[in-house]
Image (tube, grey):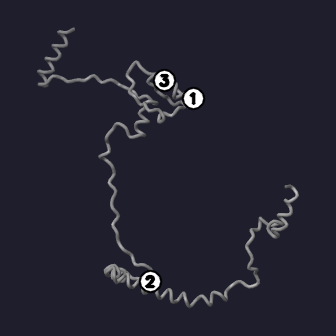
Amino acid sequence: WLKHQVRRRLVSIARYGVAPTTAMVIKTDLCSYTEYRIYPGHGKKFMAKDGKVSFFINAKAASLFKQRIKPVKLRWTQAWRRMNKKGKTDETTKKRTRKVAKFQKAIVGMSLEDIKKKKAQKPELRQQAKEVAAKEAKARQSKKPPAAAKAAPKGKMAGPKVPKNKGGAGAANPAAATKKYQGSR
């Protein structure tokens, strides 16, 4: 047997000039619960009523699957590691978010040129303009109060407001409410 192997190797070297580097390929499956590799001769298959086939690495994984315990909640499973970002360092391939280009629009009542002029003004000038506008607003407010007094509602009593659901003897007459409870003391 050994002579045959040596001879075969020598023939391949003579033909191709290099020794064949054939690595043995082993077909492995993945455990549907833990996501570990299952080598030939190991594992357990489970077929559900709906026809879905699950392949488990050991009885522990099969039992946990049948108990409907989520693999994400168990720290030793690959699902938990993926969920909590353990292991693989693929953080360099993060998406780069584009910065949104800022541009200005005209506001109702002001054109774009007016806005640019205001921005170009010095802060002191802007502050002075604000103060002048505030004084004008105050002057307008001081003229309005006499008109506001006339607009008071007519025919309504100026007493305290009582909620509708809190009516009865207690709300209308506080003295009657206190008399009610004097006998039980």
> Seen from this angle, which residue lies furthest right?
183
- In-front residue for pair 19/104: 104
Residue 109: mark: 2
- Identify the secondary structure beneath mark 3: helix
Q: Secondary structure at mark 1?
A: loop
Do labels 1 and 3 touch, CB within 8 Å? no
Residue under the image location 38 percent in, 20 percent down? 40
* Residue 121 position (above or below residue 49): below
Q: CA distance from mark 2 to mark 3?
A: 72 Å
| Residue 69, above or below 114 | above
Out of 72 and 54, give the one closest to the viewer.
Answer: 72
Please report whichever mark, 1 or 2, sits nearer to the chain's N-terminal start.
1
Label 2 neighbour load within 10 Å: few <14, some 14-19, many 20+: few
User: Amino acid under label 2?
Assistant: Gly
* Mark 1 surroundings within 10 Å by alpha-carbon count, few (fewer than 14), some (14 through 19), many (20 or more): few
**Circle 1 sits on which residue?**
49
Dot 1 or dot 3, earlier in sequence: 1
Q: Please name the residue shown 37% across and 38% down the image.
A: 86
The tag earlier along the polypeptide, 2 or 3, is 3
Numbered badge on residue 60: 3
In the displayed orientation, state which residue is furthest to the front: 185
- Location of residue 126 in the rendering, given as x and y in whole percent from the top left corner: 36, 82
Q: Quadrant of residue 97?
A: bottom left
Q: Is residue 182 left or right of residue 36?
A: right
Rendering coords of residue 69 (x, y %): 53, 32
Left or right of 80 on screen, residue 116? left
Identified by mark 3, the residue type is Lys
Camera-side mark, 1 or 3: 3
Total residue callouts: 3
- Choose mark 1 or mark 2, whichever is in front: 2
Q: Find residue 38 and report its image quarter.
A: top left
